[in-house]
Amino acid sequence: MPRESLSNKRIRMESIVNRLKSLYPNSKCSLNYDSAFQLLVATILSAQCTDERVNKVTSVMFKKYPDAKAFSKLSVKEIAKEIYSTGFYNNKSKNIKAMSDIVMEKYYGEVPGNMDELVVLPGVGRKTANVVLGNYFNIPGMVVDTHVTRITNLLGFVKSRNAVVIEREMEKVVDRSDWTIFSHLLIDHGRAICVANRPDCTSCDLSDLCASSIA
Protein backbone atom coordinates (compact mmCIF):
# COMPACT_ATOMS: atom_id res chain seq x y z
CA MET A 1 0.00 0.00 0.00
CA PRO A 2 1.55 3.38 -1.01
CA ARG A 3 2.32 5.90 1.70
CA GLU A 4 -0.92 7.61 2.68
CA SER A 5 -1.06 11.33 3.39
CA LEU A 6 -2.50 12.57 6.68
CA SER A 7 -5.43 14.21 4.87
CA ASN A 8 -6.25 10.95 3.08
CA LYS A 9 -5.99 9.04 6.34
CA ARG A 10 -8.53 11.39 7.87
CA ILE A 11 -10.89 10.93 4.94
CA ARG A 12 -10.57 7.14 5.13
CA MET A 13 -11.04 7.17 8.89
CA GLU A 14 -14.16 9.32 8.60
CA SER A 15 -15.67 6.72 6.26
CA ILE A 16 -14.71 3.91 8.63
CA VAL A 17 -16.21 5.62 11.67
CA ASN A 18 -19.43 6.46 9.82
CA ARG A 19 -19.85 2.87 8.65
CA LEU A 20 -19.18 1.52 12.13
CA LYS A 21 -21.74 3.91 13.61
CA SER A 22 -24.31 2.53 11.16
CA LEU A 23 -23.35 -1.04 12.01
CA TYR A 24 -23.31 -0.52 15.78
CA PRO A 25 -25.77 2.31 16.52
CA ASN A 26 -25.95 1.39 20.21
CA SER A 27 -22.20 1.23 20.74
CA LYS A 28 -21.23 2.45 24.21
CA CYS A 29 -19.24 1.58 27.31
CA SER A 30 -20.38 -1.87 28.41
CA LEU A 31 -19.39 -1.42 32.06
CA ASN A 32 -22.20 -0.52 34.48
CA TYR A 33 -21.68 2.42 36.83
CA ASP A 34 -23.47 5.28 38.58
CA SER A 35 -20.51 7.54 39.31
CA ALA A 36 -16.99 8.38 38.23
CA PHE A 37 -15.64 6.38 41.16
CA GLN A 38 -17.65 3.30 40.22
CA LEU A 39 -16.49 3.54 36.61
CA LEU A 40 -12.89 3.89 37.80
CA VAL A 41 -13.17 0.77 39.97
CA ALA A 42 -14.94 -1.18 37.22
CA THR A 43 -12.29 -0.24 34.67
CA ILE A 44 -9.49 -1.32 37.00
CA LEU A 45 -11.29 -4.65 37.44
CA SER A 46 -11.72 -5.08 33.68
CA ALA A 47 -7.99 -5.69 33.14
CA GLN A 48 -7.65 -9.29 31.93
CA CYS A 49 -11.35 -9.83 32.65
CA THR A 50 -14.55 -9.64 30.62
CA ASP A 51 -16.90 -6.70 31.11
CA GLU A 52 -19.68 -9.22 31.68
CA ARG A 53 -17.85 -10.71 34.66
CA VAL A 54 -16.99 -7.25 36.03
CA ASN A 55 -20.64 -6.18 35.84
CA LYS A 56 -21.69 -9.33 37.67
CA VAL A 57 -19.25 -8.55 40.48
CA THR A 58 -19.97 -4.83 40.72
CA SER A 59 -23.76 -5.27 40.63
CA VAL A 60 -23.46 -6.80 44.09
CA MET A 61 -20.41 -4.95 45.38
CA PHE A 62 -21.55 -1.40 44.54
CA LYS A 63 -24.81 -1.93 46.43
CA LYS A 64 -22.79 -2.56 49.58
CA TYR A 65 -19.93 -0.16 48.87
CA PRO A 66 -21.12 2.58 46.50
CA ASP A 67 -18.37 5.17 46.84
CA ALA A 68 -14.81 6.02 47.82
CA LYS A 69 -15.80 6.56 51.45
CA ALA A 70 -17.17 3.03 51.72
CA PHE A 71 -14.17 1.47 49.96
CA SER A 72 -11.67 3.40 52.08
CA LYS A 73 -13.10 1.70 55.17
CA LEU A 74 -12.42 -1.77 53.71
CA SER A 75 -9.18 -3.70 54.09
CA VAL A 76 -7.25 -5.00 51.09
CA LYS A 77 -8.30 -8.51 52.10
CA GLU A 78 -11.99 -7.55 52.17
CA ILE A 79 -11.78 -5.97 48.72
CA ALA A 80 -9.92 -9.01 47.37
CA LYS A 81 -12.73 -11.25 48.59
CA GLU A 82 -15.29 -9.13 46.72
CA ILE A 83 -13.37 -9.07 43.42
CA TYR A 84 -11.80 -12.54 43.51
CA SER A 85 -13.53 -13.80 40.36
CA THR A 86 -12.17 -10.96 38.19
CA GLY A 87 -8.64 -12.37 38.38
CA PHE A 88 -5.38 -10.76 39.54
CA TYR A 89 -7.31 -9.87 42.68
CA ASN A 90 -4.23 -9.31 44.85
CA ASN A 91 -2.89 -6.43 42.76
CA LYS A 92 -6.33 -5.08 41.93
CA SER A 93 -7.43 -5.01 45.57
CA LYS A 94 -4.24 -3.21 46.65
CA ASN A 95 -4.66 -0.62 43.91
CA ILE A 96 -8.36 -0.07 44.59
CA LYS A 97 -7.72 0.34 48.32
CA ALA A 98 -4.86 2.80 47.77
CA MET A 99 -6.80 4.68 45.09
CA SER A 100 -9.86 4.96 47.35
CA ASP A 101 -7.79 6.31 50.23
CA ILE A 102 -6.20 8.98 48.01
CA VAL A 103 -9.55 10.00 46.50
CA MET A 104 -10.91 10.45 50.01
CA GLU A 105 -7.89 12.21 51.50
CA LYS A 106 -6.88 14.42 48.58
CA TYR A 107 -10.10 14.89 46.60
CA TYR A 108 -12.74 14.63 49.33
CA GLY A 109 -14.32 11.55 47.77
CA GLU A 110 -14.64 12.93 44.24
CA VAL A 111 -12.63 11.45 41.36
CA PRO A 112 -10.60 14.18 39.60
CA GLY A 113 -11.67 14.96 36.05
CA ASN A 114 -8.33 15.44 34.35
CA MET A 115 -5.61 13.19 32.94
CA ASP A 116 -2.70 14.48 35.04
CA GLU A 117 -4.39 13.75 38.35
CA LEU A 118 -5.97 10.48 37.26
CA VAL A 119 -2.81 8.76 36.02
CA VAL A 120 -1.02 9.20 39.36
CA LEU A 121 -3.72 7.23 41.16
CA PRO A 122 -2.75 3.61 41.93
CA GLY A 123 -3.84 1.21 39.19
CA VAL A 124 -4.75 4.00 36.77
CA GLY A 125 -2.95 4.37 33.44
CA ARG A 126 -3.85 6.38 30.36
CA LYS A 127 -6.33 3.78 29.13
CA THR A 128 -8.29 3.74 32.39
CA ALA A 129 -8.11 7.52 32.68
CA ASN A 130 -9.44 7.97 29.15
CA VAL A 131 -12.33 5.59 29.87
CA VAL A 132 -13.37 7.71 32.85
CA LEU A 133 -12.78 11.06 31.14
CA GLY A 134 -14.66 10.12 27.99
CA ASN A 135 -17.56 8.16 29.42
CA TYR A 136 -18.24 10.03 32.65
CA PHE A 137 -16.84 13.53 32.28
CA ASN A 138 -17.58 13.80 28.54
CA ILE A 139 -14.01 14.87 27.89
CA PRO A 140 -12.88 13.23 24.62
CA GLY A 141 -10.54 10.35 25.38
CA MET A 142 -8.84 7.92 23.00
CA VAL A 143 -8.91 4.53 24.71
CA VAL A 144 -6.42 1.97 23.39
CA ASP A 145 -7.15 -1.63 24.35
CA THR A 146 -6.32 -4.92 22.64
CA HIS A 147 -9.12 -4.53 20.07
CA VAL A 148 -8.07 -0.99 19.18
CA THR A 149 -4.42 -2.02 18.97
CA ARG A 150 -5.13 -4.96 16.69
CA ILE A 151 -7.67 -3.31 14.38
CA THR A 152 -5.87 0.01 13.91
CA ASN A 153 -2.81 -1.99 12.85
CA LEU A 154 -4.86 -4.13 10.48
CA LEU A 155 -6.53 -1.06 8.99
CA GLY A 156 -3.07 0.32 8.25
CA PHE A 157 -3.18 3.45 10.39
CA VAL A 158 -0.34 2.39 12.67
CA LYS A 159 2.51 -0.09 12.79
CA SER A 160 2.98 -0.27 16.52
CA ARG A 161 1.83 -2.14 19.61
CA ASN A 162 2.69 0.79 21.87
CA ALA A 163 -0.55 2.14 23.34
CA VAL A 164 0.70 5.72 23.67
CA VAL A 165 1.94 5.76 20.07
CA ILE A 166 -1.41 4.43 18.86
CA GLU A 167 -3.31 6.95 20.99
CA ARG A 168 -1.33 9.86 19.53
CA GLU A 169 -1.64 8.62 15.94
CA MET A 170 -5.38 8.03 16.23
CA GLU A 171 -5.90 11.48 17.71
CA LYS A 172 -4.48 12.86 14.46
CA VAL A 173 -6.96 11.07 12.18
CA VAL A 174 -10.13 10.55 14.24
CA ASP A 175 -12.37 13.58 14.69
CA ARG A 176 -12.09 14.75 18.31
CA SER A 177 -15.86 14.43 18.79
CA ASP A 178 -15.52 10.70 18.01
CA TRP A 179 -12.55 9.90 20.25
CA THR A 180 -14.64 8.35 23.01
CA ILE A 181 -16.96 6.28 20.84
CA PHE A 182 -14.11 5.16 18.57
CA SER A 183 -12.89 2.47 20.96
CA HIS A 184 -16.44 1.23 21.59
CA LEU A 185 -17.00 0.88 17.84
CA LEU A 186 -13.76 -1.05 17.34
CA ILE A 187 -14.50 -3.27 20.33
CA ASP A 188 -17.93 -4.12 18.90
CA HIS A 189 -16.44 -4.77 15.47
CA GLY A 190 -13.62 -6.82 16.97
CA ARG A 191 -16.11 -9.04 18.76
CA ALA A 192 -18.49 -9.41 15.83
CA ILE A 193 -16.36 -9.50 12.67
CA CYS A 194 -12.67 -8.66 13.06
CA VAL A 195 -12.05 -11.39 15.60
CA ALA A 196 -8.49 -12.03 16.75
CA ASN A 197 -6.76 -14.77 14.71
CA ARG A 198 -9.82 -15.30 12.49
CA PRO A 199 -11.14 -12.01 11.07
CA ASP A 200 -14.11 -12.51 8.76
CA CYS A 201 -12.91 -10.26 5.93
CA THR A 202 -15.52 -11.54 3.47
CA SER A 203 -18.32 -10.30 5.75
CA CYS A 204 -16.61 -7.06 6.74
CA ASP A 205 -18.17 -3.76 5.69
CA LEU A 206 -14.73 -2.14 5.96
CA SER A 207 -12.95 -4.49 3.55
CA ASP A 208 -12.55 -1.83 0.84
CA LEU A 209 -11.04 0.57 3.39
CA CYS A 210 -8.74 -1.91 5.12
CA ALA A 211 -5.06 -2.35 4.32
CA SER A 212 -5.14 -5.98 5.47
CA SER A 213 -8.39 -7.20 3.93
CA ILE A 214 -8.27 -10.51 2.08
CA ALA A 215 -11.84 -10.13 0.82
Image (spheres, rainbow, N blue to C red):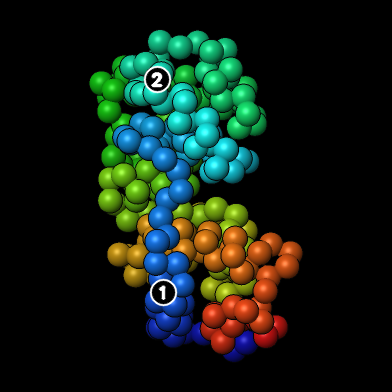
Give the vertical position of 88 relative to 198 (above or below).
above
Residue pointed to by mark 1: 22
> Which tag, 2 or 1, sits closer to the chain's start?
1
Give the vertical position of 71 relative to 155 (above or below).
above
Q: Residues within 10 Å of mark 1 (few under 14, many from 20)?
A: few
Give the vertical position of 125 relative to 174 (above or below).
above
* Residue 136 occupies quadrant: top left
Q: Does residue 165 appear in this view? A: no
Secondary element at image label 2: loop
Residue closer to the observer: 159 or 205: 205
Quadrant of the image for the N terminus?
bottom right
32 relative to 146 in the view: left or right: left
> Residue placed at 47% from the left, 26% from the top?
60
> Residue placed at 51% from the left, 25% from the top?
95
71 relative to 214 in the view: left or right: left
Q: Are marks 2 and 1 in contact (CB under 8 Å)?
A: no
Number of marks: 2
The image shows residue 161 at horizontal and vertical percentages of: 62, 58
The image shows residue 194 at horizontal and vertical percentages of: 62, 68
| Residue type, numbered disc 2 | Tyr
Residue pointed to by mark 2: 65
Residue closer to the observer: 144 or 30: 30
Q: Does residue 40 appear in this view? A: yes
